[in-house]
Amino acid sequence: MQDIAIVIVSHNSWAHLPKCLDSLKLAINDIDAEVFVVDNASTDQTCNKIKDLYPWCNLIKCEINGGYSRGNNIGLKAAGFPVSATFRHALLLNPDTEMPMDALHALLTYMDSQSNIGVLGPKLILNNGKLDKACKRGLPTPSTAFYHMSGISKIFPKHPIFGRYHMTHIDENEIGDVDSTVGACQLIRGEALAKAGLMDETFFMYGEDLDINLRIQQLNYRIVYYPRVIVKHHKGTSTRQTPSPMIREFYRAMKLFHHKHFEAQHSAITNKIIYGVITIICQYKLFQNRLKPSHKRVVGSAPE
């Protein structure tokens, strides 16, 4: 079996993709790995440039942009997942990341040292040098989301209940079990992927990583944040191109996730209130974003 299949989904990401692939080329040295670049109907000549400059990548050209989940699934299927035993692990990687030379060796070594880990995520650092908080997350239950949105999590960041949304009770330099890592860079055990299945394509973008982490966790695998590996993340490079549709998608994913995992646990009135609150927050974020210069428009937790 080969060590790892690396799947990168790109959509008009050429501004950052070369740095990602250049760093990845060094990181896969001496590792039995294959790289699958799935291009979601880019119009920036990404496919032609990859063919010319990065012939060692397996390029898959999609005629339509079917979303992040579908793009990853196309790449995973090309690598033989979820049923094939060609690769021991899969790495989902965003095109706006930069991988240190020893990062993959370190991630694989730690993953292989503990057979109960299903997903392993490194520490992600933003352009401003701060932690990408999405790389260690708690399950966004209604109560956890309330503590986050109401600001209670900021008052009690070290509390294991109130600070659970971004797992702020776990120090950013401390290895810890979390509910989810982030799809920008996460190593998934092939065996766990075979049992859990691929990404839910109902999620166009956002929420799909939470969903697959939860499904793997429900199979009694651990989801682990591993800050001994640090990856740079130029976050929001694709979503800034169309911020308003992406904001709508971000909050649509919240509703989908609640519907799939939590709706049955609550009354019809409670669910109606939850969906209503999500809609109100979405409209507020859309209005707030319109007042900002284009370069400062954000989606979700992307940096300004």
Image (cartoon, helix red, strand yellow):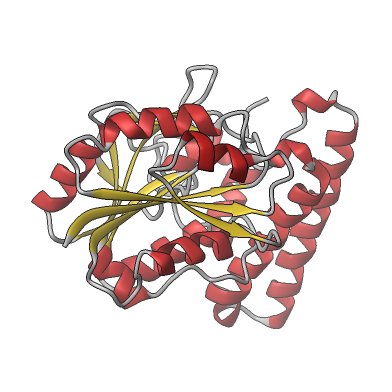
Residue 28 location (% of width, % of height): 26, 38
Residue 45 location (% of width, % of height): 68, 40
Q: Which residue shows up at 53% across the image and 34% down it?
A: 17
**Left or right placement of residue 30 versus residue 38 in this view:** left
| Image quadrant containing the C terminus | top right
Q: Which residue shows up at 69% across the image and 47% down it?
A: 42
Whether residue 171 is visible here, answered yes or no, is no
Name, please, the residue furthest toward the front. Answer: 52
Looking at the picture, does residue 112 appear above or below residue 221? above
Q: Which residue shows up at 69% across the image and 54% down it?
A: 41
Q: Quadrant of residue 239?
A: top right
Residue 228 location (% of width, % of height): 24, 30
Q: Which residue shows up at 72% across the image and 34% down it?
A: 298
Q: Quadrant of residue 115?
A: bottom left
| Image quadrant containing the N terminus | bottom left
Residue 296 location (% of width, % of height): 76, 25
Q: Quadrant of residue 207?
A: bottom right
Looking at the picture, does residue 147 appear above or below residue 237? below
Looking at the picture, does residue 208 appear above or below residue 24? below
Q: Nearer the viewer, residue 91 or 115?
A: 91
